[in-house]
Image (tube, rainbow, N blue to C red):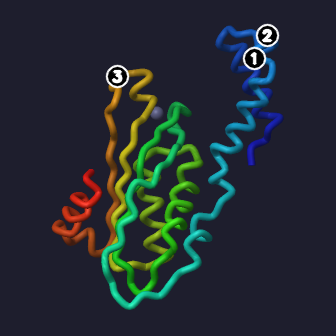
Amino acid sequence: MVDIEKASAAMKMFLEAIGEDPNREGLKETPMRVAKMYNELTAGYDDCPQEHLKKVFSVENSELVIVKDIEFFSLCEHHLLPFFGKVHIAYIPEEKVVGLSKLARCVETFARRLQIQEKMTTQIANTIDETLKPIGIMVVVEAEHTCMTMRGIKKVGSSTVTFATRGKFKEDSNLRKEVLDLIKC
Ligand SMILES: [Zn+2]
């Protein structure tokens, strides 16, 4: 939970620091607005990702499940600028599967924190691995970082792809290839 009063005061100071007048008409409400916005954008700290994966269904077969194109928005912890894109999750269940929307909720929990893409990818894979204990899991995240496209090297349209594999996906390169073909990444 963001300390709205503290964040709002800090934002007012920040506006002064960049040479703005925080009391001018257009900016009067901005510190409070920004504080409330960060409360929403960092709501993942108060959310438990494992909780979302608790409700499982039993299955008899162990066939590949792929949930692709889970959209997310996050904030890079180095610049507090957005990075956004898609998460693809592939796993081979060991008797237990989870509702598809729950995987998206799990992604959301980690995205709504100050993040780096590599860490987020690992956290998603670890959480699903520990909770569902599947035969294998692979998480692919592709994202555009506005700290790369708006500033610095200004590589518009460039995307960063990160992977995390656990279990069978670690050993089996054909399986990884099959997943990458299916998600066309
Ligand atoms: Zn950054």
Q: Is residue 16 above or below residue 177?
A: above
Residue type at tag 1: Leu
Residue 179 sits in quarter? bottom left
- Count every numbered label the image shows and give the total: 3
**Label 1 near label 2: C-beta < 8 Å?**
yes
Residue that label 3 marks: 153
How far apart are the two marked residues, 1 and 3, measured between alpha carbons? 30 Å
How far apart are the two marked residues, 2 and 3, measured between alpha carbons? 33 Å
Residue type at tag 3: Ile
How far apart are the two marked residues, 2 and 1, measured between alpha carbons? 6 Å
Residue pictured at 55% horizontal, 54% vertical: 108
Residue that label 2 marks: 24
The spot of residue 124 in percent (x, y) is 46, 61
Q: Is residue 78 above or below residue 13?
A: below
Residue pictured at 47% horizontal, 88% vertical: 58
Residue 27 numbered tag: 1
Q: Secondary structure at mark 3?
A: loop
Residue type at tag 2: Arg
**Label 3 near label 1: C-beta < 8 Å?**
no
